[in-house]
Image: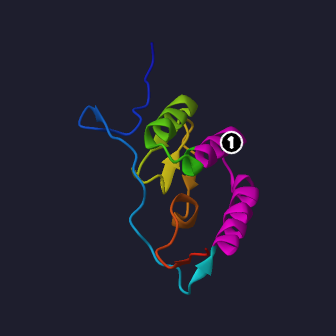
Amino acid sequence: MGCSSSRTMTEGRKEKIRRPKSWKHPQPISRAELTQMREEFWDTAPHYGGKKEIWDALRAAAEEEDLSLAQTIIESAGVIVQNTDLTICYDEKGSKYELPKYVLRDPSNLIRTK
């Protein structure tokens, strides 16, 4: 049969993913600036290694508001989650995927426009 990797497993139970803890950008940032940072990250991320399909799944999960759907996306793609906030993940071949908090959660000092 062979070995299978355990996704988000700790002591035999599956852990649910969660949003990262609140964070603060060095200076207040607008929604447009945050969107640009995110787009630049996702456009360049596959060039750092790993599979495009995994990067696509991580992006879909990061952008999904419903955490249970994000969990399903991660599990379906075979992503192995080291940190439940998705900041460090692996694929089934052992390639590492590091996600910055700014693609996973808005900063606490985001400039809100009316």
Q: Residue at x 55, y 46 (%)?
A: 64
Q: Which residues are magenta?
A: 31-60
- Quadrant of the image occupied by residue 61: top right
Disc 1 target residue:
51
Q: Residue at x 74, y 60 (%)?
A: 44
Q: Position of residue 8 (x, y in %)?
A: 38, 39
Front one among 47 and 3: 47
| Local SS, label 1 | loop
Q: Amino acid at mark 1?
A: Lys
Placement of the N terminus among the 4 image quadrants? top left
Q: Position of residue 4 (x, y in %)?
A: 44, 25
Front one among 12 and 21: 21
User: Is residue 38 shown in magenta?
Assistant: yes
User: Is residue 94 shown in magenta?
Assistant: no
Q: Position of residue 69 (x, y in %)?
A: 50, 36
Q: Residue at x 60, y 80 (%)?
A: 29
